[in-house]
Image (spheres, rainbow, N blue to C red):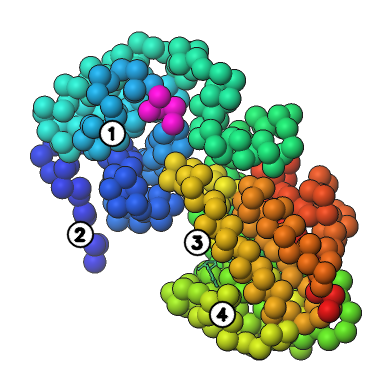
Amino acid sequence: MTPPRKRHPAARKRPLDGARLTAYDVLDGVTSRDAYANLLLPQLLRERFELDERDAAFATQLAYGTLRARGTLDAILTTLVSRPLADLDPRVLDLLRLGTHQLIDLRVPSHAAVDTTVDLTRAIVGTGASGLVNAVLRKVATGGDRAAWLTTLGGDDEQRLALATNHPRWIVDAWRDALGGDEELEPALAADDAAPEVHLVARRTDRAALVEESGGEAGPWSPYAVRLHGGDPGRLASVRSGVAAVQDEGSQLAGLLLARAPMEGRDEAWLDMCAGPGGKAGLLAAVRPEGVRLTAADRAPHRAELVRSALAGEADVEVLAADGREAPWAAGSFDRVLLDAPCTGLGALRRRPEVRWRRTEADVAPLVELQLELLAGALASVRPGGVVAYVTCSPHTEETVAVVDVAAARDDVEVLPVAPLFPEVPGIARGDYAQLWPHRHGTDAMFMALLRRTR
Ligand SMILES: C[S@@+](CC[C@H](N)C(=O)[O-])C[C@H]1O[C@@H](n2cnc3c(N)ncnc32)[C@H](O)[C@@H]1O
């Protein structure tokens, strides 16, 4: 039986543009309920049968593009709306952003961008608001495309770069600092703003077979990676059965770091201390030598459940809901410990378009405190001679180099250089630590460090 067609309540009176309405609903979910666009959008696309493939692609482009460009869109709107934007009805502000994005970034004819947004406003907010939206969007159209608007907005070089690449200024500063200067800053931020390819990891299947099945190509760095140029990975039999999974190639290298670390003596107990949802644990389970027992922990019980599903079918694994700072296991129990620490996620912004505007500089300090405590917990969990891999999906110096430097200063800890363990990957050394970059490696900006407990 065909399932009943669901229509948006606002579309009942007269037909609205389905792609634009869906994009608006994503913006509204992000604004009003702190939703994650990468979860909400696929859910809406599954529910709305009336959208064909082209509509779905347009809805995705509109929603993600508008979320990423929020800083630039708001800078433009601030010059055209007489009130502070924060005083507008949040629905009206999202509609203005949606219309402005189409006018400055997409080749949507002005009348189509304006008229469809005015229609949406009338249906969602009411006729009163549609006059304002109409007037403001006409002025946006008169101002030209993004390049013209950036000239109009002016500002210093830093401001121009932030607006051109859709990043808040504090993130531009953090990336410059991590890159060690301005030389690669613009390409790095541009790559961070581009829609990423989907990467697969061949966990319990042959990579060549996964290349064949998916139509993708072998990733350049991880021997388990396949890069897709399109298509829905959820449709692949290998992904559905769990022998393969979606995982950024940089995350794969971070997992492989633990496995590749040189080791003397016993090597039979591995710990993934912050394992949820289980991406790296899944890879570690697949690449560990025979006889190694993998323990995977996460503080959040629901995240530990996700790890359990990721490890379903694997023998010799244990999943715990446990806080790495108050570990239930005995000190020195493990030979290798992966600490994939909770972080700002500034290196994975390309996958989560709204996160760059949700995060603030004030988030960094409490995370650093947690990272320092977790790293101390990881070092307590490893035996003398054992190794700890410290990993973040952020290049921010405070959460990376600065955290590891504190541990490295201890007299029972030595730093093991990471780059020599990945001779096939150029340009990753960040001192003795390593840093991946989207513009250099086509991966998320993962940070990796390796420490050994000497006694
Ligand atoms: C970056 S994510 C880990 C991603 C995971 N390694 C993967 O590859 O799928 C960080 C995880 O740390 C967990 N976490 C945060 N604080 C923790 C703590 N004190 N002890 C253990 N886990 C914690 C979070 O719940 C989150 O799942």
Q: CA distance from mark 4 to mark 1?
A: 42 Å
- 113 relative position to 316: left or right: left
Magenta-colored segment: predominant secondary structure = helix
Q: Which residues are magenta?
A: 71-75
Image quadrant for the N terminus?
bottom left
- Disc with the residue nearer the chain's start (2 vs 4): 2
Callout 2 secondary element = loop
Q: Which mark is residue 326?
A: 4
Q: Amino acid at mark 4?
A: Glu
The crowding category of the residue bearing disc 1, from other C-alpha atoms within 10 Å (few below 14, some 14 to 19, many at least 20), is: few
Q: What residue is shown with label 3?
A: 234
Q: Which mark is residue 4?
A: 2
Q: Amino acid at mark 1?
A: Ala
- Disc with the residue nearer the chain's start (3 vs 4): 3
- Disc with the residue nearer the chain's start (3 vs 2): 2
Q: Are marks 4 and 1 in contact (CB under 8 Å)?
A: no
